[in-house]
Amino acid sequence: MKKEINWEERLSEEEYKILRLKGTEPPFSGQYDNFYEEGIYLCRGCGNSLFSSEDKFKSGSGWPSFRKPVREENISLQEDHSYGMVRTEVLCAVCEAHLGHYFEAETRHCINSLAMEFIPDEQAEEIEDVILNHSKEEIALIKSVLDQEGITYVIKNEGIQDLFGAGRIGTGVNQLVGEIKIAVKKKDYRLVMYLMENIL
Ligand SMILES: [Zn+2]
């Protein structure tokens, strides 16, 4: 059950043109083109981890260039026939945002700065809490999605409360509401929030 996301509302006009309309920022214009700090690059749309500074290199192309993604499953490659060329489009595997192109001959993922958000290494591993108030089924679903996405999390408490027993009217599984507090790494926080919003 995927919800419709209002991307126009969520992204700036420039980001929207690239991520959702497959645009390209002008070369040498992006904030991460000539940028070599150590850290991780997340998808600006959903927070999915895309690339690491370890795999970034100076290509001279005018766009941030990476040898490989942090995890093959985090991006998807698709043949692109736009502008009379045959190219390979790079997409975010989670929110299907357009990120840039892959040039196989150069082993180069050529990515728009506007499609990414950088988190320095010293912040990436910081811990943030996410508090969820959902039914037992929804919490089980959340856990399975986090496992599937390879997100590290720690459950800090898990108090499932039976609201029927507490005098609420109604029966059935949806009346079982739990509060669960999970700790995730800062680099995964936005993705976790995105997944929550989209699966529930
Ligand atoms: Zn994404």
Image: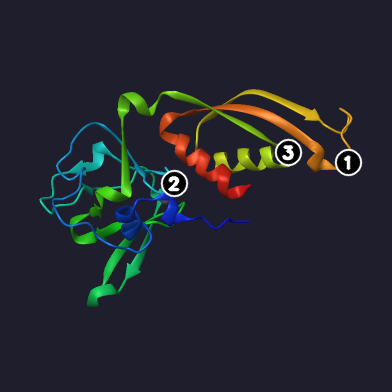
Identify residue type, mark 3. Ser
Secondary structure beneath dot 2 equals loop
State the residue position of label 1: 171
Q: CA distance from mark 1 to mark 3?
A: 13 Å
In which image quadrant can residue 197 be found? Answer: top right
Res 90 → quadrant: bottom left
Residue 125, image x and y in percent?
A: 40, 26
- 74 relative to 84 in the view: left or right: right
Q: Is mark 3 within 8 Å of ligand 1?
A: no
User: For numbered disc 1, what is the local secondary structure?
Assistant: loop
The amino acid beneath tag 2 is Cys
Residue that lies at the very extreme toward the left in this rendered image = 60
**Left or right: 69 in relation to 27:** right
Q: Disc 1 marks which amino acid?
A: Thr
Q: Is mark 2 within 8 Å of ligand 1?
A: yes
Asked if the residues shown at circle 1 and circle 3 are in contact, with their CB atoms under 8 angstroms apart, the answer is: no
What SS does tag 3 mark?
Answer: strand
Q: Which residue is denoted by mark 2 in the rendering? A: 46
Q: Residues within 10 Å of mark 1 (few under 14, many from 20)?
A: few
* Mark closest to the chain's N terminus, 1 or 3: 3
Question: Compared with residue 12, is residue 37 higher up or lower down, i.e. above or below?
Answer: above
Give percent across and percent down for residue 186.
43, 30
Q: Position of residue 18 (x, y in %)?
A: 31, 58
Quarter holding the N terminus is bottom right
**Which residue was labeled with disc 3?**
135
Q: Residues within 10 Å of mark 2 (few under 14, many from 20)?
A: many
